[in-house]
Image (tube, rainbow, N blue to C red):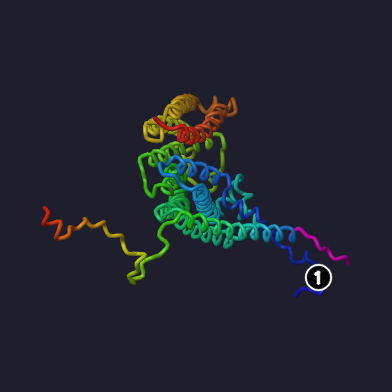
Amino acid sequence: MALRTEHPIHGRRRSRNIGLGIVLVGFVALVFALTVVKVRQGGLMEGFDHQPRVSLTPAEPAAAPTRTPAEEVQQ
Amino acid sequence: MRSAGAMTDINAYDTTPEAEFGDFVALLKPRVMSLVVFTAFVGLVVAPVDVHPFIAFCSVLFIALGGGASGALNMWYDRDIDAVMNRTQSRPIPSGRVEEGAALGLGLVLAVISVMMLGLVANWFAAGFLAFTIFFYAVVYTVWLKRWTPQNIVIGGAAGAFPPMIGWACATGGIGIESLLMFALIFFWTPPHFWALALFMKEDYHKAGVPMLTVTHGRQATRRHIFAYTLVLAPFALWLGLTSIGGPLYMAVAVVLNVAFIRGGWQILRRSEEAAIADGYAVEKRVFKLSLAYLFLHFLALMVQGWMGGW
């Protein structure tokens, strides 16, 4: 008896496998592209983990210029 | 026990039809998804915050995927009534091509993935909104309302009206009067659109146990409801034209379409069932087609108006 290698069930399974493969590869590519876009957009990359770090310290407002004692006397 | 001969013959195992990839795509209701994609996209691009094109693409993609997930959950729950009605008998579950558990699993997994990804892509407010929309369609509409009240299509229509609000939320992170009015536009459009279809598509809802207005309150009451909703809809459509996303073009389109829609509703109201049967529901079919153009052109006008600039 000749072995029937191609049966409708094979076609349907191939369709599922190829479809799922395309979806998975597409999802990986999408997450990669999304990562590139998010990183290029900038934003805070570090989260606070209860350890003070310079990179997370808010910038202090510029202090008013102080006068030297000599300047005070001139006034 | 199978004989050795049977074990070499693939036909011996082919007792049930297996699903192909397209059957799983059909579970996501691609035609409904196209409405979700379009309205969510418009909601996103008319928002007053610029979004990176790729972020916008991904946002709309995952909103659509969330809509598809709720479609799969709807088909899983409604598999018993889908098997009864002619229009839905060939769907993947009642036809036996996709197993019930597979449809439920697909719906749940896609729901989780779409919400999580939208949170990462856009913001968690939009993701929460998408989760609520999936819950609203799959549970509030499908499980609670659809088989209980003839107002099912009215309240359930909210699920189809959320996508432009989610699109807006992806860009702005919140809700605005503009997004609420886009919601109202779809919400009040759904009943006359669907009931015009129900008048000429005489489906066997009664046999399926679904209380449709045409069955529970009669066809004349349905005609009154259609006209009433076209009157309620018009002020919201025009109000949208007066907001920050409106403008002269949108306003002109809205005036023409709402006059035509109200006129169509009036013609449906004035007709008797005998007259409708005599001409093969010509007016009802025309108003149904008009309703499709109505929604598409409103959102298209919003998008073009956004590019042109508003008032």
Residue occupied by mark 1 = B8
Residue B300 visible here:
yes
Residue B269: x %, y % from top left: 46, 27
Front residue of B207/B80: it is B80
Q: Which residue is painted at 80% across and 70% down in the image?
A: B6
Q: Is residue B216 magenta?
A: no
Q: Amino acid at mark 1?
A: Thr
Question: How many labels, in total?
Answer: 1
- Quadrant location of residue B246? top left
Main SS of the magenta segment? loop
Is B190 located above or below residue A60 in the figure? above
- Percent position (x, y) of residue A63? 23, 57
Q: From the viewer's perspective, is residue A3 above or below residue B301?
A: below
Q: Is residue A4 magenta?
A: yes
The answer to which image quadrant residue B31 occupies is top right
Q: With respect to residue B87, does B252 lie above or below?
A: above
**Quadrant (top left/top right/bottom left/bottom right) for the C terminus of chain B:** top left
Question: Can you see residue B74?
Answer: no
Instruction: Between residue B126 and residue A62, name the one nearer to us.
Output: A62
Q: Nearer the viewer, residue B304 or B237?
A: B304
Report the magenta residues as a range. A1-8
- Residue B247 in picture, x, y percent from top left: 41, 30
Element on which disc 1 rests: loop
User: Toward which corner of the image does residue B289 lie, by quadrant?
Assistant: top right
* Residue B61 x, y percent position in the rendering: 53, 50
Q: Please tell me which residue lies in front, B28 or B39.
A: B39
Write the residue at 56% across / 54% down. Answer: B79
* Chain of the residue that carries numbered disc 1 in the rendered image: B
Which residue is pictured at 54% across the width and 59% down the height?
A31
Quarter of the N terminus of chain B within the rendering = bottom right
